[in-house]
Amino acid sequence: MADDPLLCKAGPFGGDRLSGSATSLLQTGLDRYFGHFDMGRTAMSTPAGTGANLSGSAWSAPPFAFTPAVFSTAGQQPTGPATLARTAEGVKVVRITAAEFKIFTGKYTPNREVARILCDDTSGLLWFHNLNRSSLRLCHFLAQMAHESTRFSQLRELLGYSTPERIVEVFGPGHSAKVTLEEAKDLVNNAAALAERVYGLGNPTKAKEFNHTVKGEGLKYRGRGLVHLTGKANYEKMGNHPDIQLPLVAQPELAEEPLNALRIAVCFWKSRNLDALADVDDIVTITKRINGGDNGLSDRKGLLKTAKSLWLDRAPE
């Protein structure tokens, strides 16, 4: 049985099409979203038309990095600063129902917690970064993330390929690893060996890019999250980002926890400056900025079409 090409693939960081600067992470400039800051207090003005009153302990000191809500052990009711972003009077967002999300993801089973956060956004993450206040922007974000994560079902890269042909298709002539069909036969259903060969010491190009110096780091820092964050160097950059602030090098598995996966996806989206392109409906350039080429463009277009059929022109409420 052939490998599902949506399940067995490298993410944006695992391929070779991105330029060196493409993986650099930019600090979020909140002045793009908020009118002005009162630098003497933690209160701030909010975007025109939201009517929200977000002040006091809701935000950290400048630059007011996003602070996620803390969920109870039952996983139901969030508490903490960012809860205000979702519950403040007057905040309006484009809403996604569970039934609509099921239609969008099709035959694949999305991670339950990711689906819950996207449909409810109790963390305030999408609202804070202005992703669910515009239906077109939301459609583009969901389409791209759905493609990268196999309809939100895979938060960790699958490296147990069952056919040598698929290994060569992903990591062969078009990848710096240049795995041959003959050696691919020994890498079938062997995640550790494949990771070492393509991301670790078996591939000097990627080992240098990812700062992998010890055997086993290829597997340890495999793709995780919705955008398949890959490589120790990228885990370190993302973990140090003001909107993330997680010990991802020491605990790489944190990147595959649902809320963290979404936070990283939003951070990556912002680092590529994709909002403006989404607002003019430019899926081709968005795709190029995500993976450096047109990989998966047909699938991405299909997902965008479905998203638009569900949510385009839906008014925030």
Image (cartoon, rainbow, N blue to C red):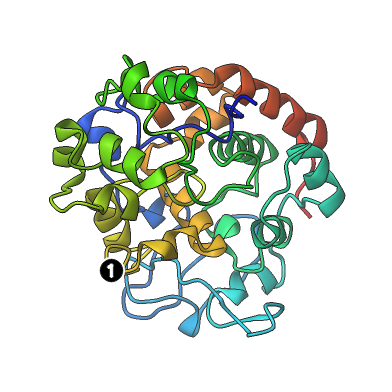
Question: 247 or 251, which is in the foreground?
Answer: 251
Q: Residue 53 appears in which quarter of the rendering?
A: bottom right
- At 71% from the left edge and 61% from the top edge, which residue is drawn? 116
Residue 154 is situated, as x and y percent measured from the top left of the image, at: 57, 47
Left or right side of 45 for 78? right
Determine whether the residue tagged by mark 1 lies in a helix, strand or loop. Answer: loop
Q: Is residue 310 above or below residue 46?
A: above
Residue 101 is situated, as x and y percent measured from the top left of the image, at: 78, 46
Q: How many marks?
A: 1
Question: 132 or 203, which is in the foreground?
Answer: 203
- At 21% from the left edge and 44% from the top edge, which residue is drawn? 210
Residue 47 in sight here: yes
Quadrant, the C terminus: bottom right
Question: 186 or 289, which is in the foreground?
Answer: 186
Q: Is residue 256 above or below residue 17?
A: below
Left or right side of 201 for 2? right
Q: Residue 18 appears in which quarter of the rendering?
A: top left
Which residue matches tag 1? 250
Quadrant, the N terminus: top right
User: Mark 1 is on which residue type?
Assistant: Ala
Residue 248 is situated, as x and y percent measured from the top left of the image, at: 32, 63
Q: Residues within 10 Å of mark 1 (few under 14, many from 20)?
A: few
Residue 34 in sight here: no
